[in-house]
Protein backbone atom coordinates (compact mmCIF):
# COMPACT_ATOMS: atom_id res chain seq x y z
CA UNK A 1 0.00 0.00 0.00
CA UNK A 2 1.15 3.58 -0.70
CA UNK A 3 1.14 5.34 2.65
CA UNK A 4 3.80 8.09 2.60
CA UNK A 5 6.17 8.60 5.54
CA UNK A 6 3.72 8.98 8.40
CA UNK A 7 3.85 6.58 11.34
CA UNK A 8 1.37 3.72 11.02
CA UNK A 9 -1.62 4.27 13.31
CA UNK A 10 -2.66 0.99 14.92
CA UNK A 11 -5.57 2.79 16.57
CA UNK A 12 -9.27 2.35 15.81
CA UNK A 13 -9.81 5.75 14.21
CA UNK A 14 -8.24 8.06 13.40
CA UNK A 15 -6.42 5.40 11.45
CA UNK A 16 -3.88 5.14 8.69
CA UNK A 17 -5.34 6.44 5.44
CA UNK A 18 -4.09 5.91 1.89
CA UNK A 19 -2.22 8.55 -0.07
CA UNK A 20 -5.20 8.87 -2.46
CA UNK A 21 -7.49 9.70 0.49
CA UNK A 22 -5.06 12.32 1.82
CA UNK A 23 -4.64 13.81 -1.67
CA UNK A 24 -8.41 14.26 -2.00
CA UNK A 25 -8.11 16.99 0.66
CA UNK A 26 -5.86 19.19 -1.50
CA UNK A 27 -8.78 21.11 -2.95
CA UNK A 28 -11.13 23.69 -1.48
CA UNK A 29 -14.87 23.28 -2.01
CA UNK A 30 -17.70 25.79 -1.66
CA UNK A 31 -20.44 24.45 0.57
CA UNK A 32 -23.13 25.85 -1.80
CA UNK A 33 -21.48 24.43 -4.87
CA UNK A 34 -23.52 21.87 -6.77
CA UNK A 35 -20.47 19.66 -7.34
CA UNK A 36 -19.83 19.47 -3.59
CA UNK A 37 -23.46 18.72 -2.82
CA UNK A 38 -23.44 15.95 -5.42
CA UNK A 39 -20.55 14.34 -3.52
CA UNK A 40 -22.59 14.35 -0.31
CA UNK A 41 -25.54 12.75 -2.11
CA UNK A 42 -23.44 9.93 -3.60
CA UNK A 43 -21.81 9.26 -0.22
CA UNK A 44 -25.24 8.91 1.40
CA UNK A 45 -26.43 6.56 -1.34
CA UNK A 46 -23.33 4.36 -1.09
CA UNK A 47 -23.46 4.20 2.72
CA UNK A 48 -27.07 2.99 2.68
CA UNK A 49 -26.03 0.29 0.19
CA UNK A 50 -23.29 -0.96 2.54
CA UNK A 51 -26.03 -2.15 4.92
CA UNK A 52 -28.48 -3.19 2.14
CA UNK A 53 -30.97 -0.51 3.17
CA UNK A 54 -31.91 1.16 -0.15
CA UNK A 55 -35.57 0.07 0.07
CA UNK A 56 -36.17 1.19 3.64
CA UNK A 57 -33.43 3.46 5.01
CA UNK A 58 -31.94 6.90 4.44
CA UNK A 59 -28.57 8.32 5.47
CA UNK A 60 -28.26 11.55 7.43
CA UNK A 61 -24.67 12.84 7.71
CA UNK A 62 -23.74 14.97 10.72
CA UNK A 63 -20.73 17.18 11.47
CA UNK A 64 -18.52 16.11 14.38
CA UNK A 65 -16.93 12.98 15.80
CA UNK A 66 -18.77 9.66 16.14
CA UNK A 67 -20.22 10.43 19.57
CA UNK A 68 -22.14 13.39 18.09
CA UNK A 69 -23.96 11.00 15.77
CA UNK A 70 -24.59 8.44 18.52
CA UNK A 71 -26.12 11.18 20.64
CA UNK A 72 -28.15 12.52 17.71
CA UNK A 73 -29.49 9.04 16.85
CA UNK A 74 -30.59 8.38 20.43
CA UNK A 75 -32.15 11.84 20.72
CA UNK A 76 -34.09 11.52 17.47
CA UNK A 77 -35.11 7.86 17.36
CA UNK A 78 -36.17 7.53 21.01
CA UNK A 79 -39.25 9.62 21.86
CA UNK A 80 -38.94 11.67 25.05
CA UNK A 81 -41.20 9.20 26.87
CA UNK A 82 -39.25 6.17 25.56
CA UNK A 83 -37.00 3.84 27.57
CA UNK A 84 -33.75 2.31 26.30
CA UNK A 85 -32.21 -1.04 27.25
CA UNK A 86 -28.41 -1.19 26.91
CA UNK A 87 -26.61 -4.56 27.01
CA UNK A 88 -23.48 -3.26 28.69
CA UNK A 89 -20.09 -4.94 28.14
CA UNK A 90 -17.64 -2.08 27.73
CA UNK A 91 -16.66 1.57 27.56
CA UNK A 92 -18.79 2.58 24.57
CA UNK A 93 -21.91 0.92 26.02
CA UNK A 94 -21.21 2.91 29.15
CA UNK A 95 -20.98 6.08 27.02
CA UNK A 96 -24.46 5.39 25.59
CA UNK A 97 -25.81 5.17 29.15
CA UNK A 98 -24.18 8.52 29.95
CA UNK A 99 -25.70 10.09 26.83
CA UNK A 100 -29.16 8.78 27.79
CA UNK A 101 -28.69 10.39 31.22
CA UNK A 102 -27.84 13.75 29.60
CA UNK A 103 -30.83 13.42 27.25
CA UNK A 104 -33.18 12.63 30.12
CA UNK A 105 -34.31 9.36 28.49
CA UNK A 106 -35.24 6.53 30.84
CA UNK A 107 -32.80 3.62 30.54
CA UNK A 108 -31.82 0.24 31.96
CA UNK A 109 -28.68 -1.85 31.52
CA UNK A 110 -27.88 -5.55 31.40
CA UNK A 111 -24.40 -5.70 32.95
CA UNK A 112 -22.20 -8.27 31.24
CA UNK A 113 -18.51 -9.09 31.82
CA UNK A 114 -16.23 -7.35 29.30
CA UNK A 115 -15.12 -10.65 27.78
CA UNK A 116 -18.71 -11.89 27.29
CA UNK A 117 -21.34 -10.81 24.81
CA UNK A 118 -25.10 -10.36 25.20
CA UNK A 119 -27.43 -13.04 23.78
CA UNK A 120 -30.91 -12.99 22.31
CA UNK A 121 -32.15 -14.85 25.40
CA UNK A 122 -30.84 -12.09 27.70
CA UNK A 123 -32.69 -9.47 25.65
CA UNK A 124 -35.86 -11.61 25.64
CA UNK A 125 -35.75 -11.89 29.41
CA UNK A 126 -35.11 -8.16 30.00
CA UNK A 127 -37.87 -7.10 27.59
CA UNK A 128 -40.34 -9.50 29.17
CA UNK A 129 -39.47 -8.21 32.65
CA UNK A 130 -39.84 -4.52 31.75
CA UNK A 131 -42.58 -3.68 29.23
CA UNK A 132 -41.77 0.06 29.54
CA UNK A 133 -38.67 -0.50 27.39
CA UNK A 134 -39.24 0.85 23.87
CA UNK A 135 -35.75 0.48 22.33
CA UNK A 136 -32.51 -1.46 22.65
CA UNK A 137 -29.18 0.28 21.99
CA UNK A 138 -26.41 -2.14 20.98
CA UNK A 139 -22.71 -1.47 20.43
CA UNK A 140 -21.85 -3.82 17.55
CA UNK A 141 -18.09 -4.02 18.04
CA UNK A 142 -17.27 -2.84 21.58
CA UNK A 143 -14.00 -1.10 20.77
CA UNK A 144 -13.06 -0.87 24.47
CA UNK A 145 -12.03 -4.54 24.29
CA UNK A 146 -12.59 -5.49 20.61
CA UNK A 147 -15.45 -7.90 21.30
CA UNK A 148 -18.07 -8.52 18.59
CA UNK A 149 -21.65 -8.41 19.87
CA UNK A 150 -24.05 -10.64 17.91
CA UNK A 151 -26.22 -8.13 16.05
CA UNK A 152 -28.51 -10.55 14.09
CA UNK A 153 -29.45 -12.46 17.25
CA UNK A 154 -30.15 -9.25 19.22
CA UNK A 155 -32.13 -7.75 16.30
CA UNK A 156 -34.30 -10.86 16.09
CA UNK A 157 -35.05 -10.65 19.83
CA UNK A 158 -36.05 -6.97 19.46
CA UNK A 159 -38.29 -7.86 16.51
CA UNK A 160 -40.00 -10.65 18.52
CA UNK A 161 -41.02 -8.04 21.10
CA UNK A 162 -41.79 -5.22 18.64
CA UNK A 163 -39.03 -2.99 20.06
CA UNK A 164 -36.81 -0.56 18.18
CA UNK A 165 -33.06 -1.18 17.77
CA UNK A 166 -30.28 1.41 17.53
CA UNK A 167 -26.83 0.09 16.61
CA UNK A 168 -23.57 1.90 17.34
CA UNK A 169 -21.60 0.39 14.46
CA UNK A 170 -18.80 2.93 14.75
CA UNK A 171 -15.92 0.49 14.54
CA UNK A 172 -17.67 -2.28 12.56
CA UNK A 173 -19.42 -0.47 9.71
CA UNK A 174 -17.89 -1.52 6.41
CA UNK A 175 -15.86 -4.33 7.96
CA UNK A 176 -18.46 -6.62 9.51
CA UNK A 177 -21.68 -7.52 7.76
CA UNK A 178 -24.77 -5.51 8.70
CA UNK A 179 -27.88 -6.35 6.67
CA UNK A 180 -30.96 -4.32 7.56
CA UNK A 181 -32.96 -6.14 4.88
CA UNK A 182 -32.66 -9.38 6.88
CA UNK A 183 -33.45 -8.10 10.38
CA UNK A 184 -35.08 -4.82 11.49
CA UNK A 185 -32.81 -2.00 12.67
CA UNK A 186 -34.09 1.53 13.30
CA UNK A 187 -30.71 3.24 13.08
CA UNK A 188 -27.09 2.31 12.32
CA UNK A 189 -24.45 4.84 13.37
CA UNK A 190 -20.85 5.19 12.19
CA UNK A 191 -18.32 7.84 11.17
CA UNK A 192 -15.94 8.81 8.40
CA UNK A 193 -12.64 7.98 10.10
CA UNK A 194 -13.23 4.29 10.83
CA UNK A 195 -13.46 1.18 8.61
CA UNK A 196 -14.32 3.08 5.42
CA UNK A 197 -10.83 4.61 6.02
CA UNK A 198 -11.67 8.29 5.62
CA UNK A 199 -10.44 11.00 7.98
CA UNK A 200 -12.36 11.97 11.13
CA UNK A 201 -14.81 14.86 11.16
CA UNK A 202 -18.26 13.59 10.23
CA UNK A 203 -20.59 10.86 11.39
CA UNK A 204 -23.72 9.48 9.81
CA UNK A 205 -26.92 7.80 10.87
CA UNK A 206 -28.62 5.32 8.55
CA UNK A 207 -32.19 5.47 9.78
CA UNK A 208 -35.40 3.78 8.76
CA UNK A 209 -37.22 6.37 6.68
CA UNK A 210 -40.55 5.89 8.53
CA UNK A 211 -38.83 6.19 11.92
CA UNK A 212 -37.06 9.39 10.87
CA UNK A 213 -40.25 10.85 9.43
CA UNK A 214 -41.98 10.35 12.78
CA UNK A 215 -39.07 11.76 14.81
CA UNK A 216 -39.84 15.48 14.44
CA UNK A 217 -39.75 17.20 17.82
CA UNK A 218 -37.86 14.40 19.61
CA UNK A 219 -34.45 16.11 19.57
CA UNK A 220 -33.47 18.29 22.53
CA UNK A 221 -30.91 20.11 20.41
CA UNK A 222 -30.97 22.01 17.11
CA UNK A 223 -27.42 21.01 16.12
CA UNK A 224 -28.21 17.34 16.77
CA UNK A 225 -31.62 17.36 15.10
CA UNK A 226 -31.36 14.68 12.40
CA UNK A 227 -34.91 15.25 11.20
CA UNK A 228 -34.09 18.92 10.60
CA UNK A 229 -30.77 18.08 8.90
CA UNK A 230 -32.48 15.53 6.65
CA UNK A 231 -35.44 17.66 5.60
CA UNK A 232 -33.16 20.65 4.92
CA UNK A 233 -30.83 18.46 2.86
CA UNK A 234 -33.71 17.05 0.87
CA UNK A 235 -35.01 20.52 0.10
CA UNK A 236 -31.70 22.20 -0.70
CA UNK A 237 -29.20 19.32 -1.24
CA UNK A 238 -26.97 21.24 1.20
CA UNK A 239 -25.81 20.60 4.74
CA UNK A 240 -27.67 22.79 7.28
CA UNK A 241 -24.55 24.32 8.80
CA UNK A 242 -20.92 24.54 7.60
CA UNK A 243 -19.98 21.09 6.26
CA UNK A 244 -16.53 19.58 6.85
CA UNK A 245 -15.74 19.97 3.14
CA UNK A 246 -12.29 18.38 3.07
CA UNK A 247 -13.47 15.49 5.22
CA UNK A 248 -16.37 14.89 2.82
CA UNK A 249 -14.06 14.95 -0.22
CA UNK A 250 -11.66 12.52 1.48
CA UNK A 251 -14.58 10.29 2.47
CA UNK A 252 -15.70 10.10 -1.17
CA UNK A 253 -12.18 9.02 -2.18
CA UNK A 254 -12.11 6.47 0.67
CA UNK A 255 -15.49 5.06 -0.38
CA UNK A 256 -14.26 4.72 -3.99
CA UNK A 257 -11.33 2.65 -2.71
CA UNK A 258 -13.63 0.64 -0.45
CA UNK A 259 -15.86 -0.25 -3.41
CA UNK A 260 -12.86 -1.00 -5.67
CA UNK A 261 -11.49 -3.37 -3.01
CA UNK A 262 -14.77 -5.35 -3.08
CA UNK A 263 -16.85 -3.63 -0.39
CA UNK A 264 -17.52 -5.04 3.08
CA UNK A 265 -16.68 -8.71 2.39
CA UNK A 266 -13.22 -7.86 1.02
CA UNK A 267 -12.52 -5.22 3.66
CA UNK A 268 -13.57 -7.59 6.43
CA UNK A 269 -11.37 -10.33 4.98
CA UNK A 270 -8.29 -8.07 4.88
CA UNK A 271 -8.88 -6.99 8.48
CA UNK A 272 -9.35 -10.64 9.52
CA UNK A 273 -5.96 -11.48 7.93
CA UNK A 274 -4.47 -8.52 9.81
CA UNK A 275 -5.98 -9.74 13.09
CA UNK A 276 -4.80 -13.32 12.63
CA UNK A 277 -1.28 -12.32 11.56
CA UNK A 278 -1.02 -9.99 14.56
CA UNK A 279 -2.37 -12.45 17.13
CA UNK A 280 -0.18 -15.30 15.83
CA UNK A 281 2.94 -13.10 15.79
CA UNK A 282 2.29 -11.72 19.27
CA UNK A 283 1.52 -15.22 20.61
CA UNK A 284 4.93 -16.35 19.35
CA UNK A 285 6.44 -13.55 21.51
CA UNK A 286 4.46 -14.86 24.52
CA UNK A 287 1.56 -12.36 24.51
CA UNK A 288 -1.95 -13.44 25.49
CA UNK A 289 -5.13 -11.83 24.21
CA UNK A 290 -7.81 -10.64 26.62
CA UNK A 291 -10.58 -12.18 24.51
CA UNK A 292 -11.01 -15.72 23.20
CA UNK A 293 -10.62 -15.73 19.41
CA UNK A 294 -14.25 -16.75 18.73
CA UNK A 295 -15.59 -13.40 19.98
CA UNK A 296 -12.68 -11.29 18.75
CA UNK A 297 -13.75 -8.81 16.03
CA UNK A 298 -11.19 -8.04 13.27
CA UNK A 299 -10.94 -4.45 14.53
CA UNK A 300 -8.79 -4.02 17.63
CA UNK A 301 -7.01 -6.58 19.81
CA UNK A 302 -6.54 -6.22 23.56
CA UNK A 303 -3.32 -7.87 24.80
CA UNK A 304 -2.37 -8.53 28.41
CA UNK A 305 0.68 -6.50 29.40
CA UNK A 306 3.75 -8.59 30.33
CA UNK A 307 4.10 -9.09 34.09
CA UNK A 308 7.86 -8.35 33.98
CA UNK A 309 8.74 -5.49 36.41
CA UNK A 310 10.77 -3.87 33.59
CA UNK A 311 7.54 -3.33 31.59
CA UNK A 312 5.59 -0.07 31.61
CA UNK A 313 3.22 1.05 28.84
CA UNK A 314 4.64 4.56 28.32
CA UNK A 315 8.27 3.63 27.49
CA UNK A 316 7.01 0.60 25.53
CA UNK A 317 4.72 2.93 23.50
CA UNK A 318 7.62 5.35 22.85
CA UNK A 319 9.96 2.59 21.72
CA UNK A 320 7.40 1.08 19.35
CA UNK A 321 6.56 4.59 18.09
CA UNK A 322 10.26 5.23 17.36
CA UNK A 323 10.03 2.20 15.06
CA UNK A 324 7.07 3.74 13.20
CA UNK A 325 3.98 2.25 14.88
CA UNK A 326 1.43 3.96 17.15
CA UNK A 327 -0.21 1.63 19.70
CA UNK A 328 -3.26 2.31 21.88
CA UNK A 329 -3.49 2.10 25.68
CA UNK A 330 -5.82 -0.43 27.31
CA UNK A 331 -9.26 0.63 28.51
CA UNK A 332 -9.80 -1.99 31.24
CA UNK A 333 -9.67 -1.22 34.94
CA UNK A 334 -9.14 -4.74 36.35
CA UNK A 335 -6.16 -5.91 34.32
CA UNK A 336 -3.24 -4.13 32.67
CA UNK A 337 -3.55 -4.30 28.90
CA UNK A 338 -2.73 -2.45 25.69
CA UNK A 339 -4.53 -2.48 22.36
CA UNK A 340 -3.42 -2.83 18.76
CA UNK A 341 -5.79 -1.88 15.96
CA UNK A 342 -5.90 -3.92 12.78
CA UNK A 343 -8.08 -1.55 10.70
CA UNK A 344 -6.99 1.18 8.28
CA UNK A 345 -5.06 1.21 5.03
CA UNK A 346 -2.68 -1.48 6.24
CA UNK A 347 -2.19 -5.15 5.46
CA UNK A 348 -0.62 -8.25 6.98
CA UNK A 349 2.85 -6.93 6.18
CA UNK A 350 2.38 -3.99 8.60
CA UNK A 351 1.19 -6.53 11.19
CA UNK A 352 4.37 -8.61 10.79
CA UNK A 353 6.44 -5.42 11.04
CA UNK A 354 4.74 -4.23 14.22
CA UNK A 355 5.36 -7.64 15.82
CA UNK A 356 9.09 -7.17 15.03
CA UNK A 357 8.96 -3.62 16.43
CA UNK A 358 7.34 -4.97 19.63
CA UNK A 359 9.97 -7.73 19.94
CA UNK A 360 12.86 -5.26 19.55
CA UNK A 361 11.26 -2.78 21.99
CA UNK A 362 10.82 -5.44 24.69
CA UNK A 363 14.43 -6.53 24.21
CA UNK A 364 15.59 -2.90 24.62
CA UNK A 365 13.57 -2.63 27.84
CA UNK A 366 14.88 -5.93 29.22
CA UNK A 367 11.40 -7.46 29.37
CA UNK A 368 11.43 -11.25 29.26
CA UNK A 369 8.72 -12.46 31.67
CA UNK A 370 5.62 -12.38 29.48
CA UNK A 371 3.10 -13.95 31.87
CA UNK A 372 0.59 -11.20 32.85
CA UNK A 373 0.44 -10.14 36.52
CA UNK A 374 -3.29 -10.84 36.80
CA UNK A 375 -5.13 -13.07 34.39
CA UNK A 376 -8.59 -12.16 33.10
CA UNK A 377 -11.32 -12.90 35.65
C1 LIG B 1 -18.02 1.75 19.31
C2 LIG B 1 -17.71 3.22 19.34
N1 LIG B 1 -18.69 4.08 19.61
C3 LIG B 1 -18.48 5.40 19.67
C4 LIG B 1 -17.23 5.92 19.43
C5 LIG B 1 -17.05 7.38 19.59
O1 LIG B 1 -16.51 8.01 18.55
P1 LIG B 1 -15.71 9.38 18.68
O2 LIG B 1 -14.53 9.17 19.56
O3 LIG B 1 -15.36 9.61 17.25
O4 LIG B 1 -16.65 10.41 19.22
C6 LIG B 1 -16.16 5.07 19.13
C7 LIG B 1 -14.80 5.59 18.87
O5 LIG B 1 -13.87 4.89 18.57
C8 LIG B 1 -16.42 3.68 19.08
O6 LIG B 1 -15.43 2.81 18.82
Image (cartoon, grey):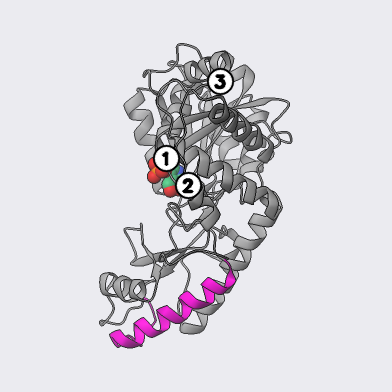
Say which element carries label 3: loop
N-terminal of the pair, mark 3 or mark 2, is: 2
Overall secondary structure of the magenta section: helix
Q: Position of residue 131 (x, y in %)?
A: 53, 23
Q: Which residue is mark 1?
A: 201
Whether residue 166 appears in this view of the structure is yes
Callout 2 crowding tier (Cα within 10 Å): few <14, some 14–19, many ≥20:
many
The residues bearing labels 3 and 1 have C-alpha atoms spaced at a distance of 20 Å
Farthest front residue in view: 27
Spatial CA span between label 1 and label 2: 7 Å
> Which of label 3 and label 1 is nearer to you?
3
x and y percentages locating residue 352 in the rendered image = 53, 77
The residue lying toward the viewer, choosing from 35 and 215, is 35
Mark 3 packing: few (<14 Cα in 10 Å), some, or many (20+)?
some
Q: Check mark 2 vs ligand 1: CB closer than 8 Å? yes or no.
A: yes
Asked whether the residues under the numbered discs 1 and 2 touch, taking CB atoms below 8 Å apart as contact, a structural biologist would say yes
Q: Which residue is mark 2?
A: 193
In the rendered structure, the answer to whether residue 169 lies left or right of residue 377 reads right
Distance from Cα at disc 3 to Cα at disc 2: 23 Å
Image coords of residue 96 (percent x, y) = 41, 36
Q: Is residue 128 in view? A: no
Which range of residues does the magenta coloring cover?
347-372
Residue denoted by label 3: 237
Amino acid sequence: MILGNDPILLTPGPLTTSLATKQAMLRDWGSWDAAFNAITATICRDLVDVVHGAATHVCVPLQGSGTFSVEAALANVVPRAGKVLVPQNGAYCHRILRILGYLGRAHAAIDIAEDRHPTGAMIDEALKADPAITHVALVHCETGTGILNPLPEIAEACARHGKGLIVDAMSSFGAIEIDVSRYPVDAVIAASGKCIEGVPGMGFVIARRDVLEKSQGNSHSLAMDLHDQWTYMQKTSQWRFTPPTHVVAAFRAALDQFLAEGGQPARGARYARNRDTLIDGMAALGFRTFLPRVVQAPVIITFHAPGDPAYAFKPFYEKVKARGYILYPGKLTQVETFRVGCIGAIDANEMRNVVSAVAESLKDMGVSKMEPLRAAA
